[in-house]
Image (cartoon, grey):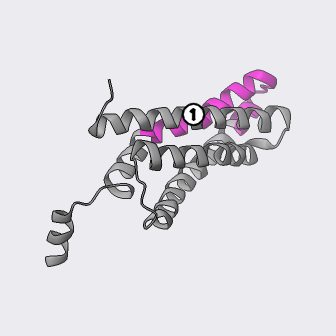
Amino acid sequence: MILRGRWGRFVRYGASSAAATAASAGAFAIAYQLSHLGPGLSSVAAFLAGAAINFVGNRYWAWARRQRARLGRDVLGYLLLAVGTAVAAALVTSLADSWTDRLGLSGDRRTVLVEGAYFATYAAMFLVKFVVLDRLLFAERSRHQVESTTRA
């Protein structure tokens, strides 16, 4: 059964987000635990790993936008939304890293808590991002909507 409409978009958005999350999780763990890059750079590495997957999955699959005319606008809007979320995640992971350091945690426990803070930030933004993408960035404007807004 193929879901259509907003629920279908939400399911495809969720699947795209899951793929991006898996890529981000791997990148964060490698950067933070294996490469010892710290929470800020690890968040950036995780962001870069997931952002391209998420944008392509959302624009071309979840919202099925194929036209090239609005590609630049879509990329810019998506980047602003994604970078805002990434900055919030970097701040939260830095706080979690500082907190786990003060508690004297190290190794796997510290990694799990800091990575958990990273993903908690993205989980909190999941629904907010869907609404912004669905209602603003990737919204389909019908001919009637365009005509009514240009008459005023």
Query: Would you identify the image quadrant in which residue 149 lies?
Result: bottom left
Name the outermost residue toward the right: 35
What is the x, y in percent for residue 71? 48, 63
37 to the left or right of 131: right
As displayed, is residue 59 above or below residue 30? below
Q: Is residue 86 visible?
A: yes
Work out whether residue 106 or residue 77 is closer to the camera in this orientation and state it. 77
Mark 1: few/some/many CA within 10 Å (<14, 14-19, 20+): some
Location of the C terminus (image quadrant): bottom left
Query: Would you identify the image quadrant in which residue 69 lies?
Result: bottom left
What is the x, y in percent for residue 11? 39, 32
Residue 104 belongs to the span the image colors magenta: yes
Location of the N terminus (image quadrant): top left
The residue shown at (46%, 66%) is 73
| Residue ID for mark 1 | 19
Work out whether residue 12 or residue 107 is closer to the camera in this orientation and state it. 12
Q: Start and end of the magenta stretch?
A: 97-126
Determine the main secondary structure of the stretch shown in magenta: helix
Q: At label 1, which amino acid type do we have? A: Ala
As displayed, is residue 74 above or below residue 52? below
The residue shown at (29%, 56%) is 140
The residue shown at (54%, 33%) is 120
Query: Would you identify the image quadrant in which residue 38 lies?
Result: top right
79 to the left or right of 28: left
As displayed, is residue 18 above or below residue 79? above
Residue 101 belongs to the span the image colors magenta: yes
As displayed, is residue 124 above or below residue 84? above
